[in-house]
């Protein structure tokens, strides 16, 4: 009996080893066609972007902020909690960075606007920023909010990325 079980076990292991799953990647072209390689998307061209004012000097910090998460502080319900990624794409350290975070409520109205005096950020780096401002009186637990954070100001050695993109200037200006 043992002589039969061992060869059957070996054959089963070999069979299962040959049945490994493979990951197949497919791509969808702009026209909706599904292909095996992005190179097969015929007639696809990346549109040229016109920007007469896109030159950023060397020796400058280039800053951007992206909201990671927000909520209220679980340990102190009188505080909000904002987490954001702050990035410096420039080739020098950014100094005296001020980040503004807002909560946009119903009808795109600002329900909270708070400032974090972030400080400095090394060149070509990204860090996770976090701060816990007091919950403003305009905040309500019964309302839904959309958070936005952006660099409001920095020392005289930096460019704020969103200010170089007209659509974002309009978005942050409206809120």
Image (cartoon, rainbow, N blue to C red):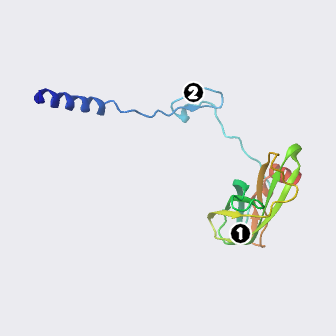
Q: Are marks 2 and 1 in contact (CB under 8 Å)?
A: no
Q: Nearer the viewer, residue 76 or 149?
A: 76
**Numbered disc total:** 2
Secondary element at tag 2: strand
Q: Quadrant of residue 60?
A: bottom right
Q: CA distance from mark 2 to mark 1?
A: 43 Å
Q: x%, y% of residue 151? A: 77, 62
User: Crowding at label 1, few (<14), some or many (≥20) Cα neighbours within 10 Å?
Assistant: some
Rendered image: mark on residue 34:
2
Q: Quadrant of residue 43?
A: top right
Examine the rendering and report whether any part of residue 53 can be seen: no
Above or below residue 170? Residue 153 is below
Above or below residue 73? Residue 145 is above
Above or below residue 145? Residue 53 is below
Q: x%, y% of residue 68? A: 67, 54
Q: x%, y% of residue 71? A: 73, 54
Task: Identify the residue position indicated by label 1 in the image.
Answer: 60
């Amino acid at each position: 009996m043992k002589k039969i079980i061992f060869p059957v076990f070996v054959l089963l292991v070999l069979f299962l080893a040959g049945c490994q799953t493979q990951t197949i990647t497919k791509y969808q072209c702009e026209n909706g066609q599904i292909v095996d390689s992005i190179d097969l998307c015929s007639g696809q061209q990346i549109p040229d972007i016109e920007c007469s004012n896109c030159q950023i000097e060397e020796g400058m910090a280039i800053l951007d902020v992206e909201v990671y998460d927000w909520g209220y502080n679980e340990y102190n319900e009188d505080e909000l909690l904002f987490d954001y990624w702050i990035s410096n794409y420039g080739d020098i350290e950014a100094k005296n960075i001020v980040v503004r975070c807002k909560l946009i409520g119903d009808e795109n109205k600002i329900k909270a606007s708070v400032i974090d005096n972030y400080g400095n950020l090394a060149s070509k780096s990204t860090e996770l920023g976090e701060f816990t401002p007091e919950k403003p009186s305009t905040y309500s637990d019964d309302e839904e909010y959309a958070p936005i954070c952006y660099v409001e100001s920095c020392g005289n050695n930096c460019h704020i990325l969103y200010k170089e993109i007209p659509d974002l200037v309009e978005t942050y200006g409206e809120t």
